[in-house]
Amino acid sequence: MVSVSQSAQNYFLNLLKKQKYGTNIRVYVKYPGTPVAKCGVSYCYKDDVTRLDVAFTMNKFIVYVYKPHIPYLRESKIDINVEECNSQLTLIAPYANKCYFIKNNDLKRRVENFLNLNINPQLSAHGGKVDLMNITESGYLSLKFSGGCNGCSMVQKTLKEGIEKQILAKFSEFKGVYDITQHNRGNHSYY
């Protein structure tokens, strides 16, 4: 859970009063579980909330956190130091750069975590998601797209130039990825 001091909550409330109704706060981690992990705080507009977000209710507003990032934000603290001429908001996240792979030999779990932490946050901006369906004996990953990615005209480019490149850079065990989705173009498709 992210702890937000009362003074920081008051600060956020003052900022949120100037925003569109329904705007809340998001706490995030870029590159979680790596030595270069970066934490931040941003506005979270009503339309930006996804089913993968967890809501933490504060006094008169909500802090949203992307569910797979919760372990990295464990014991996090947000505070503000207010002086006469300026104020300094601080976010301390002692576990942001900790790796949480319990079993390094569980390749499927490592790939699923990689997809959830590195690929799906980008796809969720378009209402999409990708899931690992199988790892073949010949070293290929079969993936299935859903949401806005299902039927999207850019899915092959996303698969080969985005996902596959990142997977191959991270996992030397694999030769490539392929899509097993039965694509049905419709109103849900992003492009």
Image (tube, rainbow, N blue to C red):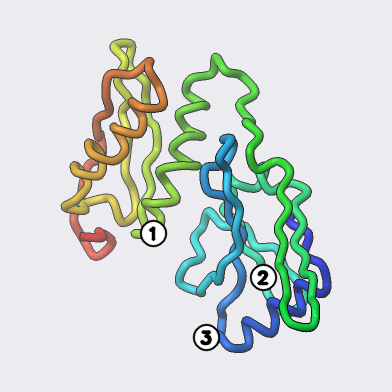
Q: Residues within 10 Å of mark 1 (few under 14, many from 20)?
A: some
Name which residue lies at 52% across and 86% down.
20
Q: Secondary structure at mark 3?
A: loop
Residue at image point 64% right, 82% down: 15
**How far from the left and from the top, in percent, is residue 107?**
48, 20
Residue matched to label 3? 20
Q: From the image, tell me which residue sits under label 2.
A: 62
Q: Is residue 77 left or right of residue 189?
A: right
Q: Label 2, label 3: how many angstroms apart (C-alpha)?
A: 14 Å
Residue 7 falls left or right of residue 121: right
- For the C terminus, the quadrant is bottom left
User: Residue 105's x, y, as percent?
Assistant: 55, 14
Does residue 123 lie above or below 48 as drawn?
above
Q: Secondary structure at mark 2?
A: strand
Q: Is disc 1 in contact with disc 3, using a CB cutoff of under 8 Å?
A: no
Identity of the residue drawn at 38% across and 48% down: 129
Query: Mark 1: which amino acid?
Result: Ala
